[in-house]
Image (cartoon, rainbow, N blue to C red):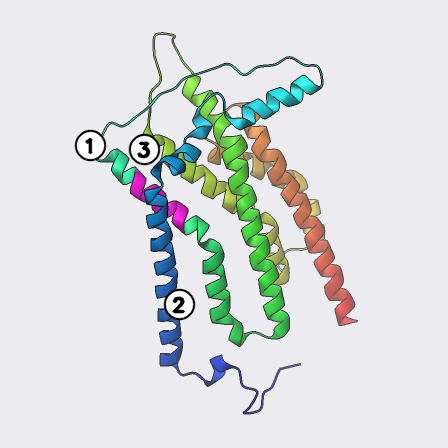
Amino acid sequence: MKKTYNDNQLPQSAMMTMGGHLEVLRKMLFRIVGVVISLGIVIFCFKETTFGILLAPHTSDFVTFRVVENMLDSIGYDFRFDAYNVPLISTELSAQFMTHISTSCYLAFLLSSPYILFELFRFISPALYEQEKRYSIVVAGVVYGLFILGLLMSYYIIFPISFQFLATYQVDPTINNTITLTSYISTFTTLSLMMGIVFQLPVIATILAKMGLIDALLLKQYRRHALVIITIIAAIITPSTDIFTLLIVTVPVYMLYELSISVVKRMTSESTVAEM
């Protein structure tokens, strides 16, 4: 049933002119830019803390390696990762300063993303029904949560293992590896963003199902094809080519595919019940 309003029930968005909408949008963008810039300045000032966190995965005593060793010790298996020392270098005069600025901007945008989502929701919410508002809040929360999970997986698992493999790989013992800071940060941010995006698979599947393009039966039918595609994507986004890194990316992403099947199936069932 189409929703109707009387003059006193019209939402604010319906009563505003185009100029009013643009003014609200302008103020919203100014607030977002202000928050991002302010946060970026704070991050820039705490250089030691920021890069202490970002550069931690490139050392052989990173927390992930210690956790794996302790877990294996607890089951009676004595295993230790090989210690390594791969120095990071800067080959250009302004490289470190520009990396500092770009990294501060990237982290500022990432940390302010909840506020950005809030501002976007506040901008569009007057035009939404109450049910749509609740649905939008849930979707925004799920998107952000999955994105953070992807970032955490990249930081604690994929990137340190990939770095250890690639940075210590030698075609000849006489050739030493020295990695540039720019290369390190570029790989780190690219991999983090890619994992954050890949982890949106259940949300993408839900949207496609809402549009009527897919259903749970179709996803089940193409499980094998999906596994092959996921493996190919994992091989593309991971910087190392070893089978272990490929597996630790492929397995959780495929689990998200299976989760997508369950979500789409449940959503379809709820829609069928609602129509009855």
Q: CB under 8 Å between callouts 3 and 2? A: no
Q: Nearer the viewer, residue 64 or 247?
A: 64
- The residue tagged 1 is 93
Amino acid beneath label 1 = Leu
At which x and y percent is residue 194? Answer: 47, 42
**Mark closer to the chain start, 2 or 1:** 2
Q: Residue at x 27, y 34 (%)?
A: 96
Judge whether residue 222 can be spotted in this image. Answer: no
How far apart marks 3 and 2 lie (CA) works out to 33 Å
At which x and y percent is residue 143? Answer: 56, 53
Amino acid beneath label 3 = Thr
Q: Nearer the viewer, residue 88 or 268?
A: 88
Q: Residue at x 64, y 71 (%)?
A: 131
In the image as oriented, which residue stretches furthest toward the bottom?
7
At which x and y percent is residue 197? Answer: 50, 46
Q: What is the quadrant of the C terminus in the image?
A: bottom right
Q: Is residue 102 magenta?
A: yes
At which x and y percent is residue 95? Answer: 25, 34
- The residue tagged 2 is 28
Q: Crowdedness of circle 3 by 10 Å Cα count: few (<14), some, many (20+)?
A: some
**Mark closer to the chain start, 3 or 1:** 1
Q: Secondary structure at mark 1?
A: loop
Judge whether residue 175 can be spotted in this image. Answer: yes
Q: Secondary structure at mark 3?
A: helix
Q: Crowdedness of circle 2 by 10 Å Cα count: few (<14), some, many (20+)?
A: some
Region of the chain picked out in magenta, as a range = 100-108
Residue 245 lies, with reference to residue 46, above or below; the image says above
